Every structure is written in structure tokens, then in C-alpha cells.
Image: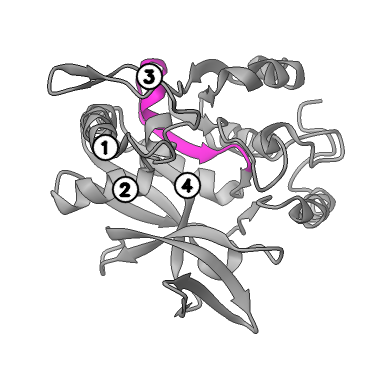
Amino acid sequence: MKPTLLILAAGMGNRYGGLKQVDPMGPSGETLMEYGIYDAIKAGFKKAVFLFRDNIVEAFEQNYKNLQDHIEVEYAFQEVNPEIIYAGKKIEYPEREKPWGTAHAVLSAADAIQDPFAVINADDFYGPSAYQAMIEYLKLSDSLQQKYAIVGYPIEKTLSPFGTVSRAILEINGHQSLKKVVERTKIKETGGVVNYYENDHQIAIPQGTLVSTNFWGFTPAIFEELSQQFSEFANQNGENLKSEFYIPFAVNNLLESQTAAVEVLTCQDNWMGVTYKEDKPGVTQQISSFIGQGIYPDNLWK
């Protein structure tokens, strides 16, 4: 088995004001994605698949040309206007300019993945223990089974002081199995209380509530399910040119139909991200602290 890391790097970075995927955060110009790859290699991942839009591949190749010295690398691409077949007929939305979302991104990498795999965002920092927990789960996975995993983080450790964020709240049963994923938007901490806004109402989220920051573990069995769901989603929502087929939406469908089970993994490290440009100084300072503690070298690939 070749445990694989699928890195979603097709985001447009609208709130950040640029491509976060290639923005340097470490002292030798490392990006958050590189710290994730470094942690994944140490945990035991053997292959990395990068999911792009065409227009950022050149920037990536210029910055990461030496990665293949450390891990097997393959590329996949998320098309804005992919071929969509529904009920035996081809449907098209030629005016669409926005990618179809994270679940479609995973589906777009199907040809490059043959083994159990993890999914991460290119612009998030998950911490070494998250990769260790995930690799231990994936090593016990059967490629044909629909048993999946997600790393959960306490909500208060995934926020930005510079604006609101969206998070998927994890509803869990008593056996650390995922019961439901509920997407919440406009989440912000004010006066020590974390709230989200819905229909102009402010609703509190309890401290310690676990949320998804898009660190999933799947087997190749997920691809057939995503293919079927995406065709149905596109048929029902395609006229809305900003509609997106998200991983939590697809997973919820599987949970509701009892088609799949998802185990919730926890880790000891803090999540970090750069939702807004103002988040960057705090992230770079924290990385410097990790280097001072000996967790990372000054230059990851030297």
C-alpha cells in the first residue's frame, strides 16, 4: 500500500488577496503546504497528489521543483467545465467561471489515486500529530471499504481575529463516529464567546466543539459515490453558477443513507491558517517558535 496525500491547491484566495498556496511563511521561503508535506513524509505518506487549476501550475513548479527528491509526486486538475453526464445525457454550463467545490476537487484526482488517501487544504497547517493519527488509520483501511475518517479540531483553535470564517461542525455519537456535518458561516469569537450568524441571529457555539478544517481520510471507494452525487448535484444546482459541491455535503449524504461510516480523529497540535492577509504575521511567528523548539529545521529540504 502507498498511503497518499491529496493536496487541494485549486482555491482562488479571494479573501486573502492572492494565491496562499505559494505565499512563503517559513524562514527559507517555505509555504504552509510544505510544512504539511514534511509532516506527512515523517508520518509515512509515500505519495503526494496536487490538485490544481491550470493557471497556478507554473507558479507551483517554479517553487517546488525539488519535492520529487523526497516523495512521489503526481498532478491532477480541477476543470471549471468538466464533462457531466446525468441520466445518460451530457449537461453543460459554459458560462461557469468558478470551480465546483472541494468534493468535486477530490473526484478530479481519481485517476491519480489507487490507495487509501488523506485530503488536506494547501493553505492550512494541521500539525505533526494530525498526520500521524491519519496514517495510523489509513494503514488499517481496506481500499474497497467505505470506512473513512476526519481530523477534528476544537472550534476556538480554528478562528481568525481578523474576520469571520466558515467551519463544518462535527456532530459525534458516543463512539467517536461522525453522525452529521453541519456547515456554519460567519463564525467569530467576541468577548470569549464563539458565535455564528444565521438569519441575522447570533448563535453561540460551545467551547471545545469539534469542527472540520478539511483533513479527511478516504479509500478509493469514495470516487464512485462522488461521481454519482456530483452528477445529481450539477443537474439540480448547475444553473446557479456559484454553487459548489462540498465534501461535508457529500459525506452527509453517505451518513444519512448509511452507506459509509466516518471515524473522528483528534490530535494534540493546533491548526493554523491564513484566511486573511493579516493572519500571516502570527503564522510566521508561530513557525519560528516551532523551529526554536526543534520541531522543524530552518530549511525543510536542505
Q: Is residue 228 visible?
A: yes
The residues bearing labels 1 and 4 have C-alpha atoms spaced at a distance of 20 Å
Which residue lies under the disc numbered 2? 249
Which residue lies under the disc numbered 1? 233
Residue 67 in picture, x, y percent from top left: 67, 20
Q: Secondary structure at mark 2?
A: helix
**Left or right for 42, reference 3:** right
Residue 47's place in the image compared with 120, above or below, is: above
Q: Residues within 10 Å of mark 1 (few under 14, many from 20)?
A: some
Q: Nearer the viewer, residue 206 or 271?
A: 206
Q: Earlier in the sequence, mark 3 or mark 1?
A: 3
Residue 93 in picture, x, y percent from top left: 36, 24
Q: Earlier in the sequence, mark 2 or mark 1?
A: 1
Q: Residues within 10 Å of mark 4 (few under 14, many from 20)?
A: many
Say which residue appears at 38% left-offset and 31% top-offset: 104
Q: Residues within 10 Å of mark 2 (few under 14, many from 20)?
A: some
The residues bearing labels 3 and 4 have C-alpha atoms spaced at a distance of 23 Å
Task: Give the magenta-colored segment's residue range.
Answer: 106-123
**Left or right for 155, reference 170:** right
Say which residue appears at 79% left-offset and 42% top-offset: 25
Which residue lies under the disc numbered 4? 214
Magenta region includes residue 9: no
Type of amino acid under label 2: Phe
Type of amino acid under label 4: Asn
Which residue lies under the disc numbered 3? 82
In front: label 1 or label 4? 1
Q: Are marks 2 and 4 in contact (CB under 8 Å)?
A: no
Q: Earlier in the sequence, mark 2 or mark 4?
A: 4
The residues bearing labels 3 and 1 have C-alpha atoms spaced at a distance of 13 Å
